[in-house]
Amino acid sequence: MNSSFTKCLKSSRFAAMGTLLMIIGSSTSDAGMIIHSGDLLTVSTDNKLRSYSLAGTGTLVQTLQITGLGLELTPTGTAQGVSVLNSQLFIGLVSTNASFTPKIVEVDPETGAAINIFDTATPQITALGDDGTNLLLLDSVNTWDVYTYTTGGNFVSEVAMTRHTLSNFQMEGIDGDGSSIFMSANLGYQPIQINDTAGNLLSFFNTNVPTDSIRGLAYDPNDATLWVASGGNFHQFSQAGVALSTVTPGLGSSSVTGLEVISPSQQVVPEPGTLASLLSLVLFGTGAVFVRNRRAKQIS
């Protein structure tokens, strides 16, 4: 084979592989996005998102102001819960003076701007989370009902949750794993209870976290543990109620209204079919370079 053609063949392969790596790299990491910047994500009454690292004392990594909610939703619109599904970021939004019905807001994870604002049939929102596929909205003001919505804002279901006590109290956190729903309570001993998706009570345990009531709950899909924000700290529990760790960033959790795990497992990775398509595109491009260079060689 002609040496110049061999060199061209090699360079075209390297260029094609470089293109593939650039495409994959751009699909798996976005440094500017808050959902890729730390380990835990909070949303607060000031409508700010904050990411924290679990290393050391829980370093604050990034702060992002939510904007573009519209004059009719501010300043009385307050974030209530946060969820990350794939590369999409959502908050619940409630009115502090009953001037609008509860909303679901999709937020741009890079700029903080509201992308979509969905109306809901949920009378009140005391917590927002997800089950790994859909969004979960909890109304525990008068009854305990969980409303499920798609990420496009479409209503899926409403399920009544059985309480572990007859006392009337509100739940301040919700998350799920697809088969169980985890809820944290604003109650003296600050329990976490676990229900199935049909609303049946499975178990509960008392966290007895100090200083302040639980202001947010997050399920960690990496190890199936539960995290809560309380008393300025993050506390980790097993589903059996065993206290595992405490991280103390001093985040002032009285203003925190939602918590989410934003570990690498939630970052975007191309599906196998997508990778195959990219590889086919690269091979096609490589072949086109071969043909073009060969023709050029023949003409010269």
Image: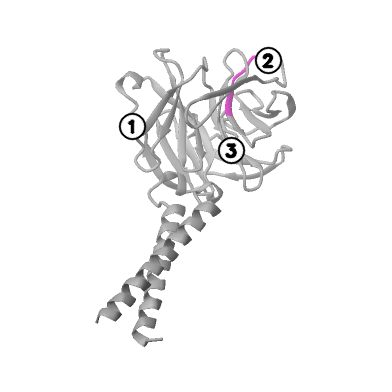
Q: Residues within 10 Å of mark 2 (few under 14, many from 20)?
A: few
Circle number at residue 96 = none
Front position in the image: 283 or 156: 283
Q: Is residue 141 visible?
A: yes
Which one is earlier in the sequence, the residue at label 2 or at label 3? 3
Q: Amino acid at mark 3?
A: Gly
Q: Of the residues tagged 2 and 1, which is closer to the observer?
A: 1
In the rendered image, residue 3, in percent from the top left (x then y), is placed at 37, 87
- The kind of residue on which mark 1 rests is Thr
Q: Earlier in the sequence, mark 3 or mark 1?
A: 1
Q: Quadrant of the N terminus?
A: bottom left
Residue toward you, 22 or 291: 291
Instruction: Count residues near mark 1 (Cα–Cα under 10 Å), then give few for <14, some for 14-19, many for 20+.
Output: some
Q: Distance of mark 2 from mark 3, alpha carbons?
A: 30 Å
* Three-letter code for the amino acid on which mark 2 is drawn: Ser
Please name the residue that numbered disc 1 is placed on.
67
Residue in view at x 67 percent, y 27 percent: 189
Was residue 254 drawn as part of the magenta stretch in this picture? no
Helix, strand or loop for disc 2: loop
- Give the residue pinned by disc 2: 167
Residues drawn in magenta? 168-173
Q: In which quarter of the view is residue 281 placed?
A: bottom left
Q: In this rendered view, identify the residue nearer to me: 83 or 2.
A: 2
Mark 2 in CB contact with mark 1 (< 8 angstroms): no
Residue 29: x and y, percent? 44, 53
Residue at x-position 58% and y-position 38%: 132
